[in-house]
Amino acid sequence: MKKGGILKCNSINLGISNLINNLNKSQKMKISNILFLLLLTLFISVCNLSAQRYSQLVDPLIGSEGNGLGCGYCYIGATYPFGMVQFSPGFFTPQRGFGITQLSGAGCANMGNFPVLPLVGVLDKSPDDMDGFKQYVEVNEANAGFLSVTMEDNTLAELTVNQRSGIARFSFDGEKGTVLIGSGVSATSVNNSRVEITSASTCEGFAYGGEFCGSETRYKVYFAAEFGREASDFGTWMKGNLLESAKLAYGKNSGAYFSFDTKTDNNVEYRIAISFVSIMNARENLRQSATEDSFDAYRESASKVWDENIGKIKVASDNKDNLVQFYTHFYHALIHPNLVSDFNGEYIGADYKIHKAQKGREVYSSFSVWDTYRTQAQLVAMLYPKEASDMMQSLVEFADQAGGYGRWILSNIETGIMQGDPTPILIANSYAFGATDFDLESAFSHMKKGATIPRLYSQDSEIRPFLRGYNEVGIAPASMLLEYTSTDYAIGQFARQALKNEKEASFFIKRSNNWKNLYNPKLNWLCSRNEDGTWKSIQNDWREATHKHYFWMVPYDLETLIDTIGGKKVAEARLDTLFKRLDASYDEDWFAAGNEPDFQVPWIYNWTDSPEKTNKVIQRIFNEMYNSSPSGLPGNDDLGAMGAWYVFASVGLYPMIPGVGGFSVNIPRFADVTIQFPEGKLNITGGSKEASEIRELRVNGEKIKQLWLDWNDLKNGGEIKIKTR
């Protein structure tokens, strides 16, 4: 009766039909209309319920273990689609309890503000930095929007969320239970914080951010929290000092605690909301988030929201493990960017001032742009044009306030992490795939300034280092230059599509040819060079990869690249060598399935005479580099970048070219895929996990000879039929 973990209603229907057919005529006559209606109602209810339980197919443990490049860095706790809070044990600091702010898939310790930790008994010494505790000992259940774990002292901790608040239920195995809330504790470090106990069941406070991947993150975040009942005792701590009955604490390694009588009622419910603006806004976020009357109701609400969201793509499979992997990666792609504006619309800008979102808009942050411009931005724009437009407007307003676009934005901080000038690509990609409702003129203005004015800064980070040489002689360090040329091409496409400005489009698209300045004919490779034209070592100037990875990062001009090195046979042989292995680290010369510069490379076979190798390589990546274990990702998920790669590769459509709405085609992993776009449903049939050659491709009945599909031909829905062998 089950197919791939989702109940198939046809089986129930067949069973009922067989039962009725086996009755004789008199028995059939005795079945009352009421019984028939009851059976029909049950049948419909069960089928509808089962068909919508996509949240239960999500396994947040996938990608939650490991270290280094080959680790997903995914948190296991409760989150909400693009929601403001992420309620979870920290990946790097699970011993400190459950923080309310996290980044999914980021490879450095981050955020983890206001961790809450339940303990059996009463507190007899200061928790200090909260590092003296043990992490949870068992995960009882984890799915989209819910986590249940057992602590070392047998306390049961259950977490769920809604859009702007976290909700917990702690079940204590003892006569007393204590809950710690770390105000001066996070996943990194907090030097300035404050917490005030405002009643026997409430507290509030603030903390400053710490750091992220070596960059200081000076955001300020406020919280308001409340328990479902009053505590019998409470107090605070500051570093090594336990302050019984005190109502105030501040500074590094500080917090508040509440103790409860749990002899007759061992459950304690807890809610917390945050704001990046003020305590008053945190209180209001908490108040307006009080939409249910019990923990179980909040949990069910979160599950339904996830059912609706990840149900936008429906795939059919007899293999439940394949379904779990697909929906988990899709789930990862819908966590960030996350809300930072409050219920009243206020948010903190990049200028550290309070701003108000435009009417009808939300403001978002957590933009891992160098990663997400390649995959995740397109997926979000296709499925969520309203939210994606608000995200683009958020980036435009950040640039208004900061002086230009950032590369990696956390809260209201440009961290300056990674290289290139990726935000124009992300904006152009989002526009090309349907997110068109934002300030297009201002968006382009910031693109152009950042791409042409040397020494322009976004907060404290230079937008395009080495821009003077790039402007004058078309030279910059190799991998950085390839990022700049992709950005230039995307800017040109944005100018053409969004503004109908052919003059600007021509300028930037022509400038994207600067990649040719890296071609070293003696080596037949792209190679870094000095501004005087002399060549550097081929090993120089490749960020987190080698020359063999970055060589292919000219997705907008692959025909020229391939012709330059000697044609399709040479390109195919070079690709074959790269794909001998799939697990390269940064300094190894074969393919790195876990690293963004390699994401698009499997589809480059579609530009050779052997497009079947695209499918063979993608199947190898699925089979060799991904699995459903906690270490089942080949690299950092990077705020959904890798999750979105998995989704695109699974449905057979990959967004290849910067600023261009279209897909390079591969064989889908599933035989039947339905994608719900805002303007219609797209059905894709004929997928296979074994076939390697596309024999025939039809879109809405029309036979397509090339392995490229235009987004405009798909966005209103329709049908893709694939025949393989």
Image: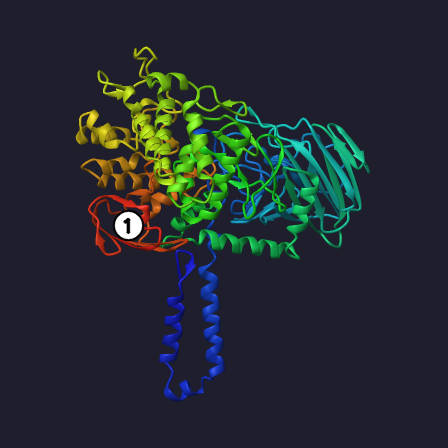
431 and 184: which one is in front?
431
Farthest residue toward the right? 245
Label 1 amino acid?
Ser
Foreground residue, 259 or 572? 572
Q: What residue is shown with label 1?
A: 688
Horizontal relation, residue 169 to residue 411: left or right: right
Locate residue 717, reporting x and y percent.
Answer: 34, 55
> Against 131, is 177 above or below?
below
On screen, residue 366 above or below 231: above
Q: Is residue 507 something one can see in this rendering?
A: yes
Q: Residue at x 44, y 39 (%)?
A: 440
The one nearer the camera, 161 or 39, is 161
Label 1: element kind: loop
Toward which corner of the image does residue 92 lie, by quadrant?
top right
Task: Name the quadrant of the N terminus.
Answer: bottom left
Q: Residue furthest bottom?
A: 26
At x 63% / y 43%, what residue is drawn?
151
Q: Residue at x 18, y 26 (%)?
A: 566
Q: Position of residue 707 (x, y in %)?
A: 24, 43
Q: Position of residue 249 (x, y in %)?
A: 76, 32
Tell me if residue 56 can be seen. Answer: no
In the image, residue 368 lies at what x, y percent? 47, 34
Q: Total of numbered circles in the picture?
A: 1
Q: Indicate whether 635 appears above or below 316.
A: above
Quarter of the rendering containing residue 593: top left
Identify the colour scheme used: rainbow
**Dot 1, how many residues are within 10 Å of its Cα: few (below 14), some (14-19), or many (20+)?**
many
Determine the image quadrant of residue 178: top right
Viewed as shown, does residue 516 lie left or right of 234?
Answer: left
